[in-house]
Amino acid sequence: MRAQPNSSDAVMFWDGVYASRPATTGPRPNVRLTEIVTGMSPGDALDLGCGDGGDALWLAHQGWHVTAIDISAVAVERLAGLADTHGFADRIAAVRHDLTDALPRGGFDLICAHYLHTPFDLNRAAVLRSAAHALRPGGRLLVVDHGSTAPWSWNQDPAVRYPSPREVAEDIGLDAAAWEIERADTPRRIATGPGGRTAEVTDHVLLIRRTA
């Protein structure tokens, strides 16, 4: 069941999620990010829901300049500290931001939304549509969603349904004359969760490129 929209409740929830995890000096990037982005020419990236910061740090290491946003101040403060420790303070701007507000200003060559799921009301389609419009020509929007529930997920609702990548694309509703779908599939992988626990999971991968 979804909670009623309340920004302060969302902040408290996600601050609690990240505060309950021990801080790490080397958070891992998402597998699909490294798989898809490796070899791309670096530019300006926007990380929607940066979490522990593994994606932002990996992108910065590849030469990207990253605006990393999250609703959790705990997550953002930790990432800002990691960016400084790893020597990427000039490449990573960690910002607390509520996605129910407008996206940060600017044009981007890559926008990532990894597992942007929440128990609170969020018009995800509108957020992703805004993200697509924030891309520069040739830029890409990478959306990676859960396609299955990991044993360690905060959401263990057996009735949850994960829309397919094509359904997500349809909900975003972009004009095919200006954006094209480069990838929409559902690969499986072995994921590692807290305490080293492993499980097979399904990812829903959508990659959209702005052509005009």
Image (cartoon, rainbow, N blue to C red):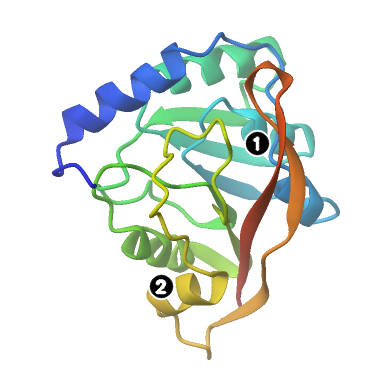
Residue 48 position (above or below residue 9) = below
Marker disc for residue 28: none
- Residue at image mark 2: 172
Q: Is residue 159 visible?
A: yes
Residue 79 position (above or below residue 203) = above
Q: Residue at x 43, y 60 (%)?
A: 161
**155 or 112, nearer to the observer:** 155
Of the residues shown, which amino acid type is indicated by label 2?
Answer: Ile
Q: Secondary structure at mark 1?
A: helix
Q: Residue at x 42, y 47 (%)?
A: 117
- Residue at image mark 1: 55
Quarter assignment of residue 9 = top left
Task: From the viewer's perspective, tell me whether residue 23 is left or right of residue 162.
Answer: right
Task: From the viewer's perspective, tell me whether residue 141 is left or right of residue 35.
Answer: left
Q: Residues within 10 Å of mark 1 (few under 14, many from 20)?
A: many
Q: Residue at x 77, y 49 (%)?
A: 189
